[in-house]
Image (tube, rainbow, N blue to C red):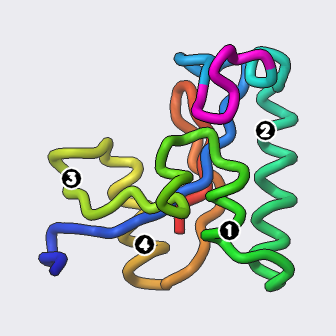
Amino acid sequence: MASKQQVRASHILIKHQGSRRKASWKDPEGQVIMNTTKESAISQLKSLRDDILSDKANFVDVASRVSDCSSAKRGGDLGLFSFLVFVSLFFSVSILYCRVLNFLSSFIYSFFLIDILW
């Protein structure tokens, strides 16, 4: 059970040329990632987000199929985490969107990644 200091979140991660690690479970050699621009990753995520919000697609199914994160095998589930474990940006957005609004986030931009949190 989650405490008040913990949040459960899921995400869809699309890696791109600027990602720190240019490989993933579905692209072990990084061929697709090295050819994916940041703009293309954003465009993909916008389209996926629109499909999820309009009920054309299911978040867990999309995350399992598309996400570059190994959490894809769990439908994008990152599990429970606290401020001390994850970066404060993820924590703040997770609380706002996942706990308070129970809503799909817009995009989370960090130094190397672009995410959608659920």
Residue 25 in magenta? yes
Q: Are marks 4 and 1 in contact (CB under 8 Å)?
A: no
- Among the two numbered marks 3 and 1 on one chain, the one whose residue lies closer to the N terminus: 1
- Among the two numbered marks 4 and 1 on one chain, the one whose residue lies closer to the N terminus: 1
Vertical placement of residue 54 versus 36, above or below: below
Between circles 4 and 1, the one closer to the viewer is 1
Crowding near the residue tagged with mark 4, few <14, some 14–19, many ≥20 C-alpha atoms within 10 Å: some
Relative to residue 97, is residue 41 drawn left or right? Answer: right
Q: Which mark is residue 61?
A: 1
Alpha carbon distance from label 3 to label 4: 14 Å
**Residue located at (77% from left, 29% from top):** 38
Between circles 3 and 1, the one closer to the viewer is 1
- Among the two numbered marks 2 and 1 on one chain, the one whose residue lies closer to the N terminus: 2
Q: Which residues are magenta?
A: 24-31
Q: Which mark is residue 74?
A: none
- Among the two numbered marks 3 and 4 on one chain, the one whose residue lies closer to the N terminus: 3
Alpha carbon distance from label 3 to label 1: 28 Å
**Residue located at (78% from left, 38% from top):** 41
Residue placed under numbered mark 2 in the picture: 41
Q: Secondary structure at mark 1?
A: helix
Q: Quadrant of residue 15?
A: top right
- Dot 3 amino acid type: Phe
Residue placed under numbered mark 4 in the picture: 96
- Dot 4 amino acid type: Leu
Q: Position of residue 37 (x, y in %)?
A: 82, 25
- Among the two numbered marks 4 and 2 on one chain, the one whose residue lies closer to the N terminus: 2
Q: Position of residue 35 (x, y in %)?
A: 84, 18
Q: Position of residue 62 (x, y in %)?
A: 71, 63
